[in-house]
Amino acid sequence: MTGPAPAGGQRRGRAIAMTGEEVEAFLAAERTCRVATVGGDGGPHVAPLWFVWDGASLWLNSIVRSQRWTDLARDPRVAVVVDAGEDFFELRGVEITGRAEPVGGVPRGDEEQPELPPVERAFARKYTGSDTFAPDGRHAWLRITPEKLVSWDHRKLATLPPRG
């Protein structure tokens, strides 16, 4: 949204934004994100992926022989959307833009990497229900520290005064 806020009130975008606590809970609960990278021809490439949010960064466990990995090696800029809801007044989500940075071996092996055990444990709990993460020799970790984070929760629209 651009332009000034409406007289006598806050922009609706800000009014329906999630609080920090709501963002944390939402990213902990949702399982799939959509990752947009810049393709070799300059166009977008979008693919679904599992993720973990650690409170400061979004972590992706990506196949290293993928279009996504090729794109990010060339241009680390990325946009990620996590969203939910079916009816308009249920829609909610988070968009994160930033740069993807590989962390650990590419692909991930058994080498020690102090940042990864908590992320891998959280990923395993979220997707397998166990504390054990086993590297498969095909995936590696990408960390996205948000340069911009935008959220929305259309369920909050019911609490706003009508536009006039």
Image (spheres, rainbow, N blue to C red):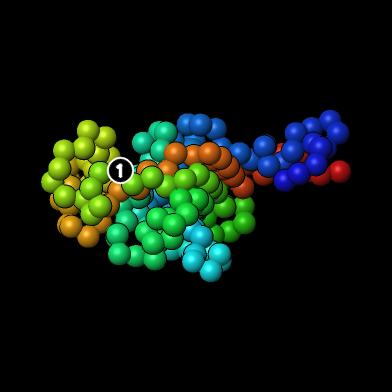
Pointer 1: what residue? 103
Q: Quadrant of residue 2?
A: top right
Going by the picture, which residue comes out furthest to the bottom? 41
> In this orientation, does residue 48 appear?
no
Q: Total of numbered circles in the picture?
A: 1
Residue 18 percent coordinates (x, y):
56, 37
Pointer 1: residues within 10 angstroms few (<14), some, or many (20+)? some
- Between 125 and 142, the one lying in front of the other is 142
- Between 111 and 164, the one lying in front of the other is 111
Q: Residue at x 72, y 41 (%)?
A: 12
Residue 27 percent coordinates (x, y):
42, 43
Residue 86 percent coordinates (x, y):
54, 60
Residue 141 percent coordinates (x, y):
30, 48
In the rendered view, would you say 110 is above or below 139?
above
Q: Quadrant of residue 33?
A: bottom left
> Amino acid type of disc 1?
Val
Q: Quadrant of residue 160?
A: top right
- Between 61 and 66, the one lying in front of the other is 66
> In this orientation, does residue 24 appear?
yes
SS for dot 1: strand
Q: Residue at x 29, y 60 (%)?
A: 63
Q: Residue at x 62, y 52 (%)?
A: 89
In the rendered view, would you say 42 is above or below 20?
below
Q: Is residue 43 found left or right of 123 in the rendered image? A: right
In the rendered view, would you say 103 is above or below 62?
above
Q: Residue at x 42, y 33 (%)?
A: 56
